[in-house]
Image (tube, helix red, strand yellow):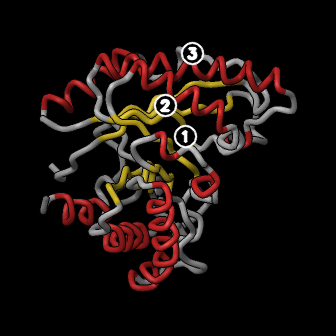
Amino acid sequence: DLGVTWISVVTTVYQDQFDSTEIYFDPSKTMTDADISQVVNRWHCLGRPAIIKPHLDLANDPMHWRGQIAFSNEADWQAWFASYRQMIYYYAELAEELKVELFIIGTELAGTSSRSADWQETIAGVQARFSGQITYAANWDGEAESIDWWPALDFIGVDAYYPVSQQSDPTVEELKMAWQPIADQLEALSTANGRPLIFTEIGYTSRNGTAMRPWDNSTPGTLDLQEQADCYQAAMEVFWDKPWFRGFLWWYWQPFAEQGGPQDLDFTPHGKPAEEVLESFYGAL
């Protein structure tokens, strides 16, 4: 009803710690193939394109996150990439079976993305199994600029949790001004690699101060529905008409009828002023 044209279906797999080399599906947490299929097929029935986006999380390592996955010796690197390819090829084959339009081959794995030859091999393996378009979701804090294998993909992908304020309750105009140098940097990245760019994630909690730390949903904060909406508005206004920009994947819309609402502090825009911002842009398409 909002006029949204694409959805990204996120499924999560695990490894125990940042330096573990075995990646596995957790039956109690990983989305089932049947559930992925149900969502994708229902969206396709509406005549709209879908994305599958696997996430790799750490199951037993609260001191680290996926961006810190790395190894000190070559044997462990090769063992990890072998396990990663087994997982990502599985989802590439599922994406092909479901006729998904875009497949995201990795998310925020900044500690690994300098391994250009290993990622090139991974990309070739995905392309052998999946005939649609592919991208990678780089973290906002410099990973995208360090990757030299963007030309092997169809799009540059960025999880865009850029801090766009140093204070609570910035105005939309202040947020737009903060976005301008970031937009210039991203345009240069797109031009240098000859690829359009997607925000493979962007989102804000409905907490006071969300513009300062958009990725943070764990720090206590007071309810602020308007700051969330203003952040949505500013990003939409800055990037909507950029010729090198292909769209926003908003983090996140939960598949629960009771999600969100005017007292919710989390990322979802459902039942909040931010939802009205989405409708004002997407509803006009």
Quadrant location of the C terminus in the rendered image: bottom left
Residue 207's place in the image compared with 201, above or below, is below
* Residue kind at label 3, given as amino acid type: Gln
Q: Residues within 10 Å of mark 2 (few under 14, many from 20)?
A: many
For residue 279, above or below residue 49: below
Cα gap from disc 1 to disc 3, whole angstroms: 16 Å
Q: Which is nearer the eye, 54 or 222? A: 54
Please rate how many residues cluster around mark 3, counting C-alpha atoms within 10 Å: few if below 14, some from 14 to 19, many from 20: some
**Label 1 neighbourhood size at 10 Å, few (<14), some (14-19), many (20+)?**
many
Q: Residue at x 74, y 28 (%)?
A: 60
What residue is shown with label 3? Answer: 86
State yes or no: discs 1 and 3 in contact (Cβ < 8 Å).
Answer: no
Tell me which numbered mark, 3 or 2, is placed earlier along the sequence. 2
In contact (CB < 8 Å): disc 2 and disc 1: yes
Picture disc at residue 107: 1
Residue that mark 2 sits on: 54
